[in-house]
Amino acid sequence: MTRWLTTCLTTCFLAPLLLACTPREMPAGPMTGPPRLEMGAGAESGAIVASDGARLPLHQWAPPEGEAPRVVILALHGLNDYSVNMMDESGPLLAKGGALVYAYDQRGFGKAPNRSFWAGAETLAADAIAAGRLIKAAHPGLPLVLMGESMGGAEALWIAGSEGPLPFDGIVATTPALWGRAYMPAWMQDLLWLGAHSVPQLGFYGAAPGVVASSDDRALRRFGTDPLTLKTTRIDMIWGVVDLMDRAVAALPRCCRVPTLVMTGQQDQIVPRHAIQAALAQVPTGARYTRIDYPDGYHLLLRDKIREKVAQDLLDWAMAAPHLPATAP
């Protein structure tokens, strides 16, 4: 009787409270005007102003003075990161090799609006496509490559399999976050659901003991001390990222509408190897798809000690990608 009464009380009183707590999402607001590109001087080159008026800080890395760029790269950072921290090492390397690199702070990160809150996969992808169109228009005649790291890589791969016209001539995903629910144990899925629907505001410290994201200690220290990187992650943001990873995995059988490069590291301790392998196995035979898998690469490939090789491989591919055939063989 006591056990029955306890179960009844829990069902009658706790369940409604759990249902009332849902993951919080802060997507784009009502349209106030067309997206626009604000250009400035120097590295901090303005902003992408979205259709709802949200200002997403934009930075650029240009080739040496007097050298014309041969390709334009638009970079999407990963979870808890932001544009400048992501590209601190690789931005100058790519620019020196002939790329004009742009990167902006995505909603919820860096200096963008609604810091620490998840904007939703649709909003993030719409921002990336809008930014791509603006940058493509600003540099007519130059190939434009969308490059995403980790969470940004999942966005890029979802976009690569999406419908509708794209402004990108190629897509690059470095160590994409492809740890979808299909590759998670049931207990982990259950805990994530419970947390996101009971205490969505609960924050988790970003660094897990013993988990190494890069072979470069300097890059790791900067990530940990930079005031603009997020040090704790709301559980409803994690829930949103997992939703994004699910979408990216589901899009892989439709890959790739434009030439796509996936760069992975065999030492990645963030995204499980089995998830990466299983997800990428869904890319159809004959797709315009290339994979480079680095034996010594960690999760943050563009910040690793092997970053010069990674950057050169990326440049070599990016400058050839627009010339690949328009349809898969």
Image (tube, grey):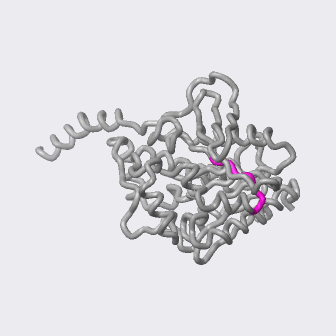
* Quarter location, residue 87: bottom right
Q: Residue at x 78, y 42 (%)?
A: 136
The magenta region covers: 97-103
Give how far across and how far down residue 106 sits, in percent.
57, 43
Q: Residue at x 59, y 40 (%)?
A: 57
**Camera-side residue: 263 or 65?**
65
Q: Is residue 74 left or right of residue 118?
A: right
Q: Quadrant of the N terminus?
A: top left
* Quarter location, residue 201: top left
**Camera-side residue: 215 or 245?**
215
Question: Could one spot residue 249 in this view of the protein?
Answer: no
Question: Could one spot residue 199 in this view of the protein?
Answer: yes
Q: Quadrant of the C terminus?
A: bottom right
**Camera-side residue: 261 or 161?**
261
Indicate whether residue 101 is drawn in magenta. yes
In the image, farthest residue toward the top: 32
Q: Residue at x 58, y 49 (%)?
A: 83
